[in-house]
Image: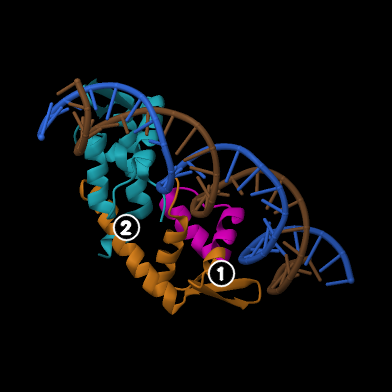
Chain colours: A orange, B cyan, C brown, D blue
Amino acid sequence: MRGLLSFQILWLLSKRKMHGEEIAIEIGRRRGDKPKPGTLYPALKELKASGLISGNRKGKTITYSLTPYGRKSVLGATRYFCRAFGDILEGR
Amino acid sequence: MRGLLSFQILWLLSKRKMHGEEIAIEIGRRRGDKPKPGTLYPALKELKASGLISGNRKGKTITYSLTPYGRKSVLGATRYFCRAFGDILEGR
DNA sequence: TTAAATACTTAGGATATCCTATATTTACAG
DNA sequence: CTGTAAATATAGGATATCCTAAGTATTTAA
């Protein structure tokens, strides 16, 4: 089962600011294993290039947060996600 | 947002037997537009090749249903899905 | 019997997704 | 200052995902 990594990153960032490692840990908690650095950071890079998130470097770490555009996009994407897959969770 | 087509097909078939068009319509209801034939049928073909579903042709239509292996796989996949994405749906 | 509609099939390809493997940067302990 | 750990970065590639754009078979209607 593949997909939705970028969406999940955006969704996590809609809850609170996080840096890369925190995001990896949160995803790992949910999926069972952490995305590899070579998976996560290119995804973050692309989300940034798309204007959906912005990064704030402080020393070693970069704290990411949603841009206004990102915030709007997550809302729409979440609506789509719930409509598309909502009933899968109702069964259990 | 891409992904999970095969999983969604399996999940729908865990509810009841369906033929291709019915599956397309059910997915269309959820996602907002029906997968194209060139998307859906290759996916069905691959699920069949993997031993997850079996098809029963009657004239023009093929009714698909889960194999025992498919039934077991859907259970596991659904558990994974709920663990990975469950909290996204709890918010709304 | 022909025409249209329905269900399915296939070829070929664009893009997304995620990986391995390696490198870089920064912080900090010794 | 040196070594190590933590956080991030990048190259390159395998595979998945989904599409467009055709096509074939089967049924139904005229």
Closer to the camera, B23 or D3? B23
Q: Which mark is residue A49?
A: 1
Horizontal relation, residue B76 to residue A36: left or right: left
Please name the predominant secondary structure of the magenta segment in the image.
Answer: helix
**Image x and y of residue B8, in percent:** 31, 43
Question: Please, which chain is the residue tagged with disc 2 on?
Answer: A
Closer to the camera, C16 or A26? C16
Q: Is residue A35 magenta?
A: yes
- Disc 2: CA contacts within 10 A as few (<14), some (14-19) or many (>=20): some
Q: Quadrant of the C terminus of chain B?
A: bottom left
Q: Quadrant of the N terminus of chain B?
A: bottom left
**Image x and y of residue A17, in percent:** 47, 73
Amino acid type at image mark 1: Ala
> Are labels 1 and 2 assigned to the same chain?
yes
**Image x and y of residue B23, in percent:** 25, 39
Q: Is residue C28 above or below residue B72?
A: below
Horizontal relation, residue D6 to residue B78: left or right: right
What residue is shown with label 2?
A81
Q: Which mark is residue B54?
A: none
Q: Please report the residue visible at 39 percent of the width from the left and 69 percent of the height from the top.
A: A73
Amino acid type at image mark 2: Phe
Question: Please, which chain is the residue tagged with disc 1 on?
Answer: A
Q: Please report the residue visible at 43 percent of the width from the left and 76 percent of the height from the top.
A: A69
Q: Is residue B75 magenta?
A: no
Closer to the camera, C16 or B76? C16
Q: Which of the 4 image quadrants contains residue B67?
A: top left
Describe the element under mark 1 as helix, strand or loop. helix
Q: Is residue A44 above or below residue D15?
A: below
- The residue range painted magenta reads A21-45
